[in-house]
Amino acid sequence: MIDLAPLRQHRDFRLLFTGRFLSMAGNAVATTAASWQVFGLTRSSLAVGLLTLADSAGMLAGLLAGGMLADRHDRRTLMLASRVPLTLLAVLLMANSLLPHPALWAVYAITLAIGLLSGIGSPASTAAMPAVVGPEQLAAAAALNAMGSQLGNLGGPALAGALIAGPGLASCYGIDAACFAIFGATLWFIRPLPPTVRAERPGLRSMAAGFRYVRHNGVVGGMLLVDTSAMIFGMPSALFPALAQQHFGGGSATFGLLTAAPGLGAMVGALTSGWTGRVRKPGLVVIGAGIVWGAAIVGFGLSYNLAAGLAFLALAGLGDLISEVLRNAMLQHYTPDPLRGRVTSLYLAQVTSAPAVGNVEAGLVAQLFSTTASVISGGAACIAGALLLGAAIPALRRATLAVPEHGDDRPQGGQGGQDQDQGQDQDQGQDQDQDQYQDQPRAAALPGPAHQIGPDELPAAE
């Protein structure tokens, strides 16, 4: 069963979990509504894929900036400043949907802005987890967060389908606005979460340090490649509106079920995820989960019965959930705190942008051939990618979540600002440490007061 210790033992985690769950649920309702609205306005699966791409483009820019900010400033403040304005943007979507002739460009523009603000706050939320729950409960916290996200993804699309058929699109966007507002309220009651080490000013050099770490660390880079392959080749959600109408002969309710089915499987995976904290080779499980995802997508493409198709989508969601839990845990385990915000932003950028590219790819293949051919070929390519990358990256196969007996073995160059005081460039020190400790686990450090490494540093936000 799922490990509930983080919820029982940590007040801040309870607040953050509650806010994130409501935010995810509201966002799932609004995203489903926006996809249906765009398909209704254009009758094009490619247009739906481009909507996902607009959200991901905004989020990608926000993530890159947010990762650098999360390594320098208080992470609670970043979450609060980026989440509250989302309420207004959801209200704008609602107002546009109430117009006699809703503007398609407005849906794309507002979705882009929502992605941007969401991206700025997401690295802070993820990078704060070791400080909120401690290193021993990272896998349990990741499973709970994934369960909350997937519960929202399960109920949100189904609720959106019912609301679209009933009160209409505006009610979906109104619920999203209310959920964002509640999330902002919960953040007020969380204690400040400054990084353990204050990073340099945001800029190309700061971001390059995160890129170099991912490139040097085979575990982090390897799991990103495996998931990228799965999402680019095996992500058919942009085809769901067309499949609901043309393949399964349904309407908005069928579309809602297709969108919700992966969340149901993921929910089952989350509820039975207690074993993930005891896995000896999590990298192998991530590779296996990618194969399960691809095989399930192939099965879905071959299904002409709605119940069978939903079952395959649920299986795909279960595999993705297990992969998500272990990828999040390995990311925090193998990344030292001074780089955690930037590396997390790169991870989240991949998680966000790869499905968007995959949706566009699925839409293009569907237009060139057929929706069925797009789904089946994508699933087969996903299986091949997982097998090839798993064979090519031995560091990922050897990855572990065990905390080293000698304690925190993170490189000393990432422990504070002393390198700069000695006239050395901080990023160069990190590069040397990355070469020395490549692919070795870093025990997560508990937070302490932020170190001041320059006269131009801002004080930690209260």
Image: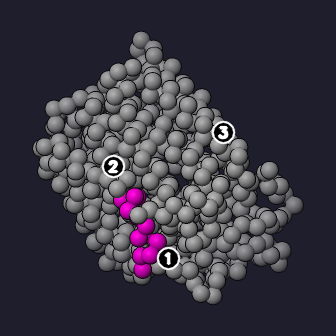
- Circle 3 crowding by C-alpha within 10 Å: few under 14, some 14–19, many from 20: some
Q: Furthest-bottom residue in view?
A: 406
Left or right, residue 340 beside residue 325: right
Q: Are marks 1 and 3 in contact (CB under 8 Å)?
A: no
Real-space Cα distance between discs 1 and 3? 34 Å
Q: Is residue 275 on the magenta stretch?
A: yes
Please give the range of residues in magenta.
269-280
Q: Residue at x 63, y 59 (%)?
A: 10
Between 419 and 334, the residue placed more toward the observer is: 334
The rendered magenta stretch, by its main secondary structure, is classed as helix
**Mark 3 falls on what kind of element?**
helix
- Circle 1 crowding by C-alpha within 10 Å: few under 14, some 14–19, many from 20: many
Classify 456 as above or below 23: below
Q: Residue at x 61, y 34 (%)?
A: 181
Q: Which amino acid, by three-letter code, is at mark 3? A: Ala
- Circle 2 crowding by C-alpha within 10 Å: few under 14, some 14–19, many from 20: many
The tag earlier along the polypeptide, 1 or 3, is 3
The image position of residue 16, as x and y in percent, is: 60, 50
Real-space Cα distance between discs 1 and 2? 27 Å
**For mark 1, what is the residue?**
401
Label at residue 265:
none
Real-space Cα distance between discs 2 and 3? 28 Å
Tag count: 3
**For mark 2, what is the residue?**
264
Q: Which amino acid, by three-letter code, is at mark 2? A: Leu
The image position of residue 261, as x and y in percent, is: 30, 46
**For mark 3, what is the residue?**
185
